[in-house]
Image: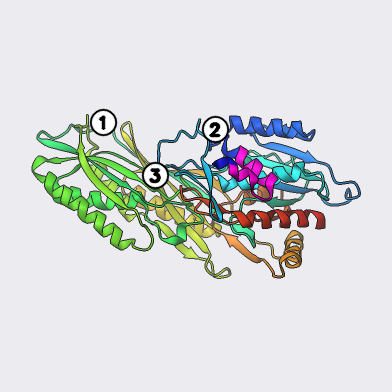
Amino acid sequence: MSAEIKKLIPQPVWCYFYDLTQIPRPTHSMGRITEHMLAFGKSHDLETLQDEAGNILIRKPATPGYEHRKTIVMQAHLDMVPQTLLAHDFLKDPIDAYIDGEWVKARQTTLGADNGIGVALIMAVLTDKSLRHGALEALFTIDEEDGMVGVNGLKADLLKGRVLLNCDSEEEGELFVGCAGGTDLNIAFRYRKGAPPIEGDVAVKISLTGLKGGHSGIDIHLGRANANKLMCRFLKEAVRDFGARLAFIDGGTLRNAIPREAVAVITLPAGNVELLWELAADYQELFRTEYAGIETGIRFTAEMEEQPASLVPEEIQDDLINAVEGCPNGVISMLHDFPGTVESSSNLATVKSGKNEIEIRILARSSSDSRKEWLCSSLESVFSLAGAKVEYGSAYGGWQPDIQSPILKTMQDTYQKLYGKRPSVKVIHAGLECGIIQETYPGMDMISFGPDVVHPHSPDEAVRIASVQKLWDFTVAVLEEGV
């Protein structure tokens, strides 16, 4: 039973995390979780407020005798990415979390350890009266996963502290001192009206499922399949060789999740249906071969469908398929100063049919502002040449490393004392809120850290139980050491 999680050690952290799994909190649906956090802070007689953007701030006074210490801000985001393999209503249903050996997982949905463990850790710090520390500020931001809405609305006069512990990293024993920036590209293929179905053609629904997906920053180097790219690869041949026409396409869910599924409805001459079945079977085998050792459950199927009311105009269909086929996707460049770390990447996140248009969303990331601009320009060029309208959406800057950081030295020394080894110092390709906080609070001394969380943004998400205990012990020691 999921309630068994509340018996894990450190119990306060796991109890708070379990409570979070019972509160629906997908991105852009923050009402229940912010109400919960406001009630939590006030119930413990802590100064608690909500800013204009919707973020929650809770202040805990310094332990007597520690008033001279610098105020430390602990920060995490409240929302989670909703991904599921089953019928699950993220606006109503709790997460069914369970213990699987050394891990906590969820049954066929995302777990919400990103960033629920960080939130639970901070809640445990706020309520533990035995801890010794300077003044603390706990900042819980909203809607981080899609546009970093909460932190973008942060005002420069809200925080008193100038040392920040971001609790949104996912590898225990590693301290992150920098992250990639990101830019959304919103792309639209628009047309005045659909084309009529062709007399004598029949409709077929093509479904691509079973991909692993994952976090488009953390997992992008793993070479996982992108459902949108694979679907358009198939469609190109179906159109060219079998007279297929596109009526509908829908792939991916969120801009920062590698798309796991895609579906398309096409029409084609009835005499070519058997050949299409064979083509779909061939592509399933091809994809399984090409992604052997990376993807394990690829399913590519075709079934008869009701005749659509209209088709995508042929020129729009061809331009769309060719542009998606030619779109740069995945790892673009690597960092030289931090070997094994991605510098720039692109995630062709969603392709969705609307009324007289097909919309595409891409998230471009880079640790280099100039490289990010170049990548965005390259992506814009591909789709502009195909006749699409390209607009830039939400953007956030990268967090530039500071290896002379005082809080970095404190945390390195503390980890050495606790575990007899130095923690790794790294830059993460995922987008952290630190970059935006740095813009709002110049000079803020920041570190990001966390437990072992694997495959966030996918139903394979899991958190290693033992790493949460180490995270707690480390956090307590860092707060006592202070800066």
Kindly report the distance in space between the C-alpha atoms of the residues bearing marks 2 and 1: 34 Å
How crowded pointer 2 is (Cα within 10 Å; few <14, some 14-19, many 20+) is rated as some
Q: Which residue is mark 2?
A: 29
By what rule are the colours in the image chosen?
rainbow
Determine whether, in the image, residue 415 is placed left or right of residue 329: right
Q: Are the residues tagged 2 and 1 within 8 Å (C-beta)?
A: no
The part of the chain drawn in magenta is: 4-19
| Residue farthest toward the right in the current orientation of the protein | 65
Which label was assigned to residue 266?
A: none
| Residue 6 at least partly seen | yes
The mark nearer the N terminus, 2 or 3, is 2
Q: Kindly report which numbered mark, 2 or 1, lies closer to the viewer in this rendering.
A: 2
The amino acid type found where label 1 is placed reads: Lys
Q: Position of residue 295 (x, y in %)?
A: 37, 57
Q: Position of residue 57 (x, y in %)?
A: 72, 38
Magenta span: predominant SS is helix
Q: Position of residue 441 (x, y in %)?
A: 71, 48
Q: Quadrant of residue 401?
A: bottom right
Question: Within the magenta stretch, is there residue 66?
Answer: no
The amino acid type found where label 2 is placed reads: Ser
Kindly report the distance in space between the C-alpha atoms of the residues bearing marks 3 and 1: 25 Å
Q: Classify mark 1: helix, strand or loop.
A: loop
Query: Please, is residue 349 above or below residue 27 in the view?
Result: below
Q: Which residue is located at x 72 percent, y 64 percent?
A: 415
How crowded pointer 1 is (Cα within 10 Å; few <14, some 14-19, many 20+) is rated as few
Q: Which residue is located at x 41 percent, y 52 percent?
A: 212
The mark nearer the N terminus, 3 or 1, is 1
Q: Position of residue 75 (x, y in %)?
A: 68, 46
Q: Classify mark 3: helix, strand or loop.
A: loop
Q: Which residue is mark 3?
A: 252
